[in-house]
Amino acid sequence: MTTKPEAAQDALNKLLQVVTLLNEDMRQDFERRGLTPARTHALWVLAELGPSPQRALAQALGVTARNVTGIVDGLVETGFVTREPHPGDRRATLVTFTDKGAHTVHHLQESQRTLAVQLFGQMPAERFSAFVNGMDDVLQVIQRELAKG
Amino acid sequence: MTTKPEAAQDALNKLLQVVTLLNEDMRQDFERRGLTPARTHALWVLAELGPSPQRALAQALGVTARNVTGIVDGLVETGFVTREPHPGDRRATLVTFTDKGAHTVHHLQESQRTLAVQLFGQMPAERFSAFVNGMDDVLQVIQRELAKG
DNA sequence: TATTGTTATACTCTATAACTATA
DNA sequence: TATAGTTATAGAGTATAACAATA
C-alpha cells in the first residue's frame, strides 16, 4: 500500500470529474449534429460493422431488439440511415448509412482525433506514459470488480 | 507537441473505456441499493446541503424544478427521503433524509472510499503522482473546451 | 410581481412480453 | 420450432409551459 486513502479519494474525485465533463463535452458535440448519445453510439458501431441487421446492432450495443427499433426509427427520421431489404432473409433489414450519416460519422471520428490531440498532444512524454500506465492499472481493477458482479 | 496523434488516440480510447466501466460499476452498486443514478446524485447532493427546498436541489443538480419533483417523488416512494414543511415559507418543502436515506448515503460514501483505495492504493508513488498530474492537465483542457461552448 | 412547486405535455432511453412474418 | 423485427406497455430521466399558492 503506497498511496494514502485521502490521496486516493482525491484522485478518484478528479477521475469522476473527468468522467462528467468528458460526457458533457461529447454530448454537446452530438447535439450540435442533431444526435443523441444512444443514436451516436449506434452510428459509431454501424461504422465498425458495416450495413447490419438490427439484431447484430442490438448485440453490439448491448441493448434489446425493441430498443434498437426505436433508435433506428430516430436515425431514419433524422436522415442518418435507411432500412434496406436484406438480400437472402426477408425477415431482416440492413441498417445502412445515408450520405449524411456517412459524413457525420466521419466528422465524429475526426472530432475524436482532435480531442485526443488537445488532451494529450502537449503532455510531456514521461507524464504521458505514466498516465497511460496508470489508466491501465485502473482499467484492470475495474474490470476485476465488474467480473465479480 | 510531444505526443503522437496515434498514441493520443489510444490514450483517449482507454480513458473512454474507464468512463464506461466506472459508470457501469457505480450503476450496479446503486441498483443493488434500490437507487437510480439521478436519485443517487440527489442523495449525494442532499448530504452536502442538508435538508433543502427543491429549488436549491434543482440548482445544485443542474436540472429543472419539474425534474426535481419527479426525482424526489421517487425517493419518497422508495423511502429514502421525506418532504417536511419549510418553517417560514409555506410554499416550500424541506427534502429530508429518512433513517434509511441517511444510512444509504453513509454506505455510498464508504463504498466510494473503498473503490478509491482499490483503484489507487497499490499504485507506485511516482506513477500515482504522474497520473494525478495528467488528470489535472486533462481537466484543464476539457474545462477550456466546455467554456468555449 | 416574483418565487415554489405542481400539473400538463412531450421526447429519449431503457426493459419485458406478446405477436407477425419468415426461415 | 426458431429467428427478425414490430406493437403494446411501463418506468426513468430530461425538457418547456401554464398554473396555484404564497412571499
Image: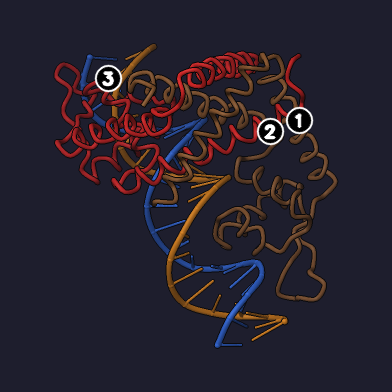
Chain colours: A red, B brown, C blue, D orange
The image shows residue A113 at horizontal and vertical percentages of 32, 29
The chain identifier of the residue carrying mark 1 reads A
Q: Which of B28 and A26 is in front in this view?
A: A26
Q: Mark 2 points at which residue?
A: A10
The image shows residue B24 at horizontal and vertical percentages of 56, 28
Task: Reply above or below: A5 against B62.
Answer: above
Q: In this view, does A18 lie to the left or right of B52?
A: left
Question: Looking at the image, do the residues carrying marks 1 and 3 touch, with CB atoms under 8 Å apart?
Answer: no
Q: Do labels 1 and 3 share a chain?
A: yes
Q: In this view, does A117 lie to the left or right of B108?
A: left
Q: Distance between the residues labelled 1 and 3?
A: 44 Å
Task: Reply above or below: B66 against B81.
Answer: below
Q: Name the residue under label 1.
A: A6
Question: Looking at the image, do the residues carrying marks 3 and 2 touch, with CB atoms under 8 Å apart?
Answer: no
The image shows residue B79 at horizontal and vertical percentages of 76, 47
Position of the N terminus of chain B by quadrant: top left
Q: How far apart are marks 1 and 2 (CA)?
A: 6 Å
Q: Residue at x 24, y 46 (%)?
A: A78
Q: Is residue A110 left or right of residue C16?
A: left
Q: Residue at x 57, y 16 (%)?
A: A143
All told, the count of numbered labels is: 3
Amino acid under disc 2? Asp
Q: Nearer the viewer, residue A68 or A142?
A: A142
Which residue, as the protein is rendered here, is positioned at the far right? Answer: B99
Q: Which of marks 1 and 3 is nearer the N terminus?
A: 1
